[in-house]
Amino acid sequence: MEKIIINTPFSRSEIWVGEKWESVSRLLPEKGVVIITDENISRLYGDRFPDFPVLTVTPGEGSKKLEVVERLAEKLLESGIDRTGFILAIGGGVVCDLAGFLSSIYMRGIGCGYVSTSLLSQVDASTGGKNGVNLGSTKNMLGIIRQPDFVLCDPAMLITLNDQEYLSGLAELIKTAVIGDRDLFDLIEKNFDEIINRNSDLLTQLVAKSVNFKAAVVSEDERETGLRRILNFGHTYGHAVELQKSVKHGFAVASGMELATDFSFEKGLISLEEKTRIVNLLLRFGLLDKHDIPDDMIEKLISHDKKKAGSDINFVFTEGIGKAVVKKVSVSEVIDFYKRFRDK
Ligand SMILES: NC(=O)c1ccc[n+]([C@@H]2O[C@H](COP(=O)([O-])OP(=O)(O)OC[C@H]3O[C@@H](n4cnc5c(N)ncnc54)[C@H](O)[C@@H]3O)[C@@H](O)[C@H]2O)c1
């Protein structure tokens, strides 16, 4: 078990990795707690939830909208939750984003903690304090950055995750390795079978490494004015694929990482050997697919990217496994590269 701390100017968050999720009760206030979860998690784990009222949402991205936040807020009010109240989210990235956002705005902010149940949320979504909901089809448009009081990641919960969701989370783990942790990359490369078999001890080690890296980045740059941008590696093209092709977040990011790695190679930032290692690892886990996005659509999607600043994009490149760098690149250069990448 490992406890990782995020310290930012206004908050402190504890992330427990490798801890049994049932031990969450010791982190909760004695009263005023409401649990938010989704129907899948409630079915699988609800009988072992701490003894507090439970609000359940429909699983999936469709629940990340203001309407659901409003409905949940009404339920909190009906349950008599006041400023001393506390929300415990038990779920994947959707439940944590939703509950984190609700806790940030309900009565101008109440306490919140997460039991993070999917690999994607354990290695990425539940660390760093970003929360929020979608606005129509535009992802994460309404939200704020506010650290939860704690996050608990129990690898035993990952056993019940379906293969696609598990692999989607693995893509974000590989992203962390590429941008910041060469040892993590080696560990993933060497332990293919154990990862596929979801070996709990190994998963604890991998999740802890990923959380440690993200926690260090967020502690230095919570508001994403500099260093935190590297976490967007693979996300410029990844978000375009996610929106256009409706593939799961991690698979879309994997395609984005392939493009960003190729782009890094073209710019002379990474060797052929390292480029091949990154792409082969993504291929080995079945994370890559060819996506053919029409020219007018790719222009529209990349021009709307949140990482855009004027006619430039803060594009994240790799400078070798374990190192990332952000460079301003014109939108047209990114689009030109995409066309060459797609047609090769
Ligand atoms: N806040 C951030 O920094 C951040 C970062 C990355 C992604 N995200 C967000 O996270 C969301 C994706 O997260 P996700 O992939 O966890 O999605 P999710 O919460 O929808 O979970 C995926 C599916 O797996 C099920 N599930 C979760 N844990 C399970 C378990 N232990 N056993 C069985 N089934 C389980 C869920 O019910 C759901 O059907 C997206 O909305 C994305 O925008 C946020």
Image (cartoon, rainbow, N blue to C red):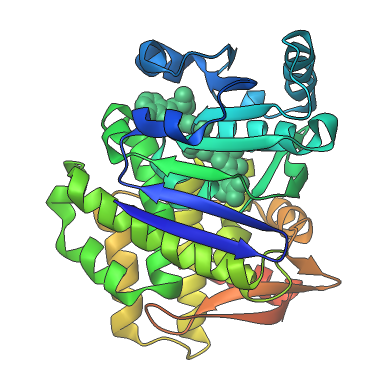
Looking at the picture, tell me which residue is in the foreground, 39 or 108.
108
| In this view, 81 is above or below 20 | above
Residue 334 image position (x, y, % from top left): 66, 72
- Taking the image as shown, residue 304 lies to the left or right of residue 4, namely right
- Say if 5 sits above or below 114 in the image: below
Residue 159 x/y as whole percent? 26, 31
- Residue 341, position as x, y percentages in the image: 51, 68
Dividing the picture into quadrants, the one containing residue 46 is top left
Q: How many labels does the image show?
A: 0
Q: In which quarter of the image is residue 327?
A: bottom right
* Residue found at the very far left of the displayed protein: 193
Name which quarter of the figure residue 303 lies in.
bottom right
Point out residue 176 in the picture as x, y percentages from the top left corner. Answer: 43, 64
x 13%, y 50%: residue: 193
Residue extending furthest toward the front:
30
Q: Please tell me which residue lies in front, 98 or 32.
A: 32
Name the one closer to the observer, 79 or 201: 79
Q: Residue at x 70, y 73 (%)?
A: 314
* Quadrant assignment for the C terminus: bottom left
Residue 158 makes an appearance in the image = yes
Q: Image point 65% across, 64% down: which residue? A: 8
Name the residue at 51% across, 63% down. 215
**Position of 188 compared to 106: left or right?**
left
Regarding residue 288, the answer to whether it shows in the image is no
